[in-house]
Structures are given as C-alpha cells and as structure tokens.
Image (cartoon, grey):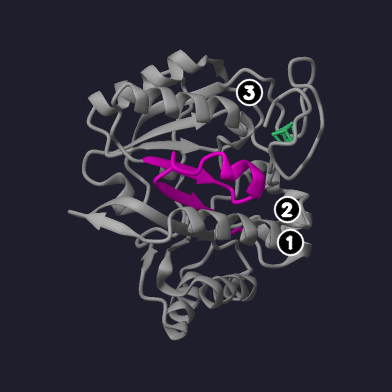
C-alpha cells in the first residue's frame, strides 16, 4: 500500500506519485477542497449538528456527469499533511460534528490510515465514515479494518455498458460488489442510537435520467445479496451540469415519475431500511461550495 507504484484503487496505474499522477490526477500529497459541517447526508449521518465532512481532491472514477467536477479534477486542492489532517478531525468535533466523513479518500489511503490511527491514539472518539464511489480494491479496504465505523459506498451501475460509457470502468458492477462485501465483513451490523448511526453500511444509488430499468436491476441485485443487513439510500438529486451536453440521454433532471417508480419497486422488493429523497427531484443545493473552508 504505497504511492511509489500506485495500485491503491482498481485503476492499477502503477505510477510513482512522487513524480507523476495516474487517473485520479493527484500526487502523493493529500489535498482537500473543504472540511466543514455538512447537513445534506442521510439523516442518521448528518443528524441535527451536521456531519464533519472532509472533501478530498481528485477522484479515480471520472464520471462524465460528475456533480463535483472542480474537486474531482483537482482544480480545487490545498495540500495537507497527516498532522494537519488529524487536527482537522479534532476541529470538526469541536464544531459539534456527529462523525468525521471522509469523502473520496481512497487515492490517499496511506495518509488516511495514518491520520485515523494518530487521532485515535490522541483520544478521538467520533465514528469515522468512509464515503466512496464504491470503486475500491478489497486489498486497500482491508487496511481500514478496525478504523472505519460506517461505510457509505455508492453502487452506481449494475450494467457494465453504462459503467463504461459514463465512468470508463466496465468492471465497476462486479468490483463494487466485492468492495461492499468487504465493507460488510468489517461492519456486519447497523447500530443507530438516538437517530445517529454509529456503525454499519449504507449503500447509495443515484438514479440517472432515463435509467429506471437499470436502477431497478441495481437495487434488486443489492437486495438479493445484502437483504436488510444494510440501509439503502435512493437518490434523485442528479443535476445535469453543462459538460453532459455530449451525453444527451442524461442531459436533464430525473422526473418525479421516474423516481417514484424506483421507490415503489424498492417497496415491492421488500426493502424497508431505506432513505428516500422528497421535494424537488434535483437541487444544486446538494453541491457545496468548494472554498477551502476548514482546510
Ligand atoms: S489511486 Fe490514482 S494513481 Fe493510484 S491506482 Fe488509483 S487512479 Fe491510479
């Protein structure tokens, strides 16, 4: 698990990140776009006081419809070291956070492991949330065993053709399932106290416009595999940003009818442990300003 011949994620670039970058676009120095309380996660993650969200710059997925493009491409990035990362965790706790929520952190895994160990050694006692695209290597996730309390993976695609077209990773459907298997091995039970999650796995699936059938296939696959051992979060917040113009089939918001069809199907399957979104189907308010706050 090192940056020198980087194989931290399934892209397996093999580059020396002290000299060049791979698909994630980031060097071996952890970089952040924002570290602040965030109120738009699932209610058991955000609670009333907010989730202490740490947004890492760069991403190995490169989805064409990325909702956080500036941060994913590393345009917004401020370097930090392990000491500063650990300080940030304590500062978020001081602000009242229910947890520390590490968003898209897999390409900085060595620093993540070190900073969590350091924080725990210094008495840090909030849950750590690992918020991920789901495109993870099991070998890397094993390094987080005993350090992460809540896994918050996406399951973006069950269909390889879509994973290839929109995220250039045709192996996503199987890779992500194996990654979620490992997350569930580490955290087999959901524990929620006073409305706040302390341990467990929540799988997110964001409906894309015109992709109701594909989404139904995805959630059936998940429910067949994991049943009610996990929570499911069905998201309708997709926002078509200008750069999806080349993908006209997804260049619109999700309709209320599309989302309701997916939610009804989830109920028919017997999914009870689910979070659904209400109100305006897609709102840019879910996209925070990446302004180095708290970094
Ligand atoms: S973390 Fe970045 S450089 Fe390493 S394998 Fe993944 S995409 Fe490539």
Q: Is residue 208 found inside the magenta-colored segment of the image?
A: no
Q: Are marks 1 and 3 in contact (CB under 8 Å)?
A: no
Residue topped by disc 1: 162
Q: Quadrant of the C terminus?
A: top left
Ligand 1 shown in quarter:
top right
Residue 223 lies left or right of residue 163; in this view the side is left
Write down the region rendered in magenta.
Answer: 128-156
Number of labels in the image equals: 3
Q: Which residue is label 3 attached to?
A: 75
From the viewer's side, name the closer residue of 142 and 135: 142
| Label 2 Cα neighbours within 10 Å, binned few <14 / some 14-19 / many ≥20 | some
Question: Residue 166, labelled with which disc?
Answer: 2
Q: Position of residue 108 (x, y in %)?
A: 60, 29
The image shows residue 93 at horizontal and vertical percentages of 27, 28
In the shown orientation, is residue 233 left or right of residue 153?
left
Tell whether circle 3 marks a residue whose Cβ is less than 8 angstroms from ligand 1: no
Residue at image position (48%, 27%) is 290
Q: Going from the N terminus, do you reach mark 1 or mark 3 first?
A: 3
Marks 2 and 1: in contact by CB < 8 Å?
yes
């Amino acid at each position: 698990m090192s940056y020198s011949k980087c194989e931290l994620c399934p892209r397996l670039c093999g580059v020396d990140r002290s000299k060049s970058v791979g698909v994630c676009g980031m060097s071996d120095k952890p970089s952040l776009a924002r570290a602040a309380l965030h109120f738009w996660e699932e209610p058991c993650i955000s609670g009333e006081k907010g989730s202490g969200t740490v947004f890492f710059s760069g991403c190995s997925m490169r989805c064409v419809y990325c909702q956080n493009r500036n941060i994913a491409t590393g345009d917004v990035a401020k370097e930090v070291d392990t000491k500063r990362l650990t300080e940030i965790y304590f500062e978020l706790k001081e602000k009242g956070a229910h947890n520390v929520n590490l968003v898209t952190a897999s390409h900085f895994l060595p620093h993540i492991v070190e900073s969590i160990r350091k924080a725990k050694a210094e008495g840090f006692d909030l849950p750590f949330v690992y918020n991920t695209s789901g495109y993870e290597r099991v070998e890397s996730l094993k390094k987080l065993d005993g350090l992460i309390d809540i896994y918050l993976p996406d399951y973006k695609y069950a269909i390889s053709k879509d994973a290839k077209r929109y995220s250039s990773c045709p192996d996503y459907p199987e890779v992500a399932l194996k990654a979620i298997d490992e997350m569930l091995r580490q955290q087999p039970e959901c524990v929620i106290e006073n409305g706040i999650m302390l341990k467990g796995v929540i799988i997110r699936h964001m409906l894309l416009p015109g992709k109701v059938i594909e989404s139904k296939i995805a959630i059936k696959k998940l429910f067949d595999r994991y049943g009610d051992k996990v929570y499911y979060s069905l998201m309708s917040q997709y926002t078509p940003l200008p750069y999806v113009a080349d993908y006209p089939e997804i260049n619109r918001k999700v309709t209320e009818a599309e989302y309701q069809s997916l939610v009804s199907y989830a109920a028919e399957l017997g999914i009870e442990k689910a979070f659904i979104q209400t109100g305006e189907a897609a709102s840019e308010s879910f996209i925070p300003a990446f302004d180095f706050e708290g970094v």
